[in-house]
Each structure stands twice: as structure tokens, then as C-alpha cells.
Image (spheres, grey):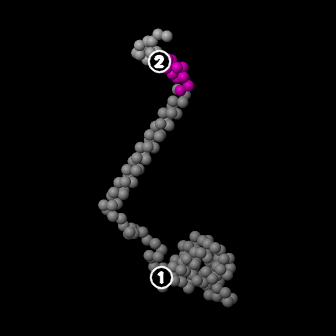
Amino acid sequence: MSTYPLPIRVAAGLATVTVEQTRQLPAQLLGLPLTVASQALQLSMRVQQQITELAIRGDETLSAWQGTEDEPEWATFDEDEPPPPAEQRLVNVAEPTDGSDVLAEYDGMSLPQLRGKLRGFSADEVEELLEHEQRNENRVEFVRMLTNRLTRLRGED
């Protein structure tokens, strides 16, 4: 076997690879758009990740310089507002008629309706609602909400 110089051997190898790649080209062309799109999406996601990481680090740096508010002035909570006057309450506790506490409109309320109106009740009224619920339907969610509200009201006294 004769030894050819390195440049000739490299040229022959390059020609062989070129012929093989040319034969496989039609099959590769079919998948080329999908490959290009996939690589573009990957690059886009990497760039977005890096931008997000930079923004997070910038937020951390800026918050260290600026400081943070404990409670924004626009944030209000139910406990911050005074309860409405008794005449504005939408559901009133009815007077007992047959020895038991009958509550006007209460039994027809849904949980969100009760939650919306509960803030206007005094501790005694909430206790009355709780006793009524426990004696009648004893719905777990209602009992829990009334108990939590009563605890808060009693803690404020």
C-alpha cells in the first residue's frame, strides 16, 4: 500500500464526506425548518431567562437602596374600616318568636353573601348567628367563618 501525502488523503476524505452528505441532503431538508425553528425558540427562551434574571437582580439592588413600605397606603382591610351603623346593615337579627333565635334572611344566604355582610355584625350578633348555625344546619364552612369572626371581635374588645 502506497502512502499518499497528507493533503491528498484529506482531499479524498473531504470528497467522500461531501458525496455522503449530498446523498442525505433530501432527507435532511425535510426536517430543516423544524430544526431551525426549534433552535430559534431555544435561543429566545435563553434570552428571556437572562433578561428576567437581570431584572430580578436589579429589583434586589434597587429595593436595598430604596427600602420597602411595610404597608402601602392604598391597602385597606376589613378590620381597618369601622362597621356601618346598625340601620345600614343589610341583614338584621330577628327577635325570638318561639324561644329560639330565628334569623331573618340568614338561612337563605350563601357563604360569600354571609362573608360580605359579616363585618357589620357585633360580637353578640355573630355569636347568635353561630349558635343558630350549630343548632340547625351546622355547615362546617359557616361555623368556621363565624367562629373566626367572633374570635377577632372578642380579641378587639
Horizontal arrangement in the rendering, residue 13 relative to residue 115 (left or right): left
What's the residue at 40%, 15% (across, down)?
A: 7
What's the residue at 49%, 17% (across, down)?
A: 16
What's the residue at 67%, 81% (across, down)?
A: 135
Front one among 41 and 90:
41
Q: Residues within 10 Å of mark 2 (few under 14, many from 20)?
A: few
Q: Residues within 10 Å of mark 1 (few under 14, many from 20)?
A: few
What x and y, as percent, mark residue 92?
A: 58, 82
Check if residue 17 falls in the magenta segment: yes
Front one among 40 and 23:
23
In the orientation shown, which residue stands out farthest toward the front? 1
Residue 140 vertical placement versus 14 (above, below): below
Horizontal arrangement in the rendering, residue 78 relative to residue 60 (left or right): right
Q: Which residue is mark 1?
A: 156
In the orientation shown, which residue stands out farthest toward the top? 2
Residue contact at pointers 1 and 2, CB within 8 angstroms: no
What x and y, as percent, mark residue 91?
A: 57, 79
Horizontal arrangement in the rendering, residue 57 relative to residue 16 (left or right): left
Say which of marks 1 and 2 sits in front: 2
Q: Main secondary structure of the magenta part?
A: helix
Q: Which numbered disc, 1 or 2, marks the residue that appears first in the sequence?
A: 2
Residue 113 image-quadrant placement: bottom right
Front one among 110 and 34:
34
Q: Magenta residues?
A: 16-28
What's the residue at 53%, 26% (across, down)?
A: 28
What x and y, as percent, mark residue 120?
A: 52, 79
Query: Disc 2 residue type?
Result: Gly
Is disc 2 placed on a helix, strand or loop?
helix
Is disc 1 placed on a helix, strand or loop?
helix
Query: Disc 1 residue type?
Result: Glu
Q: Which residue is mark 2?
A: 13
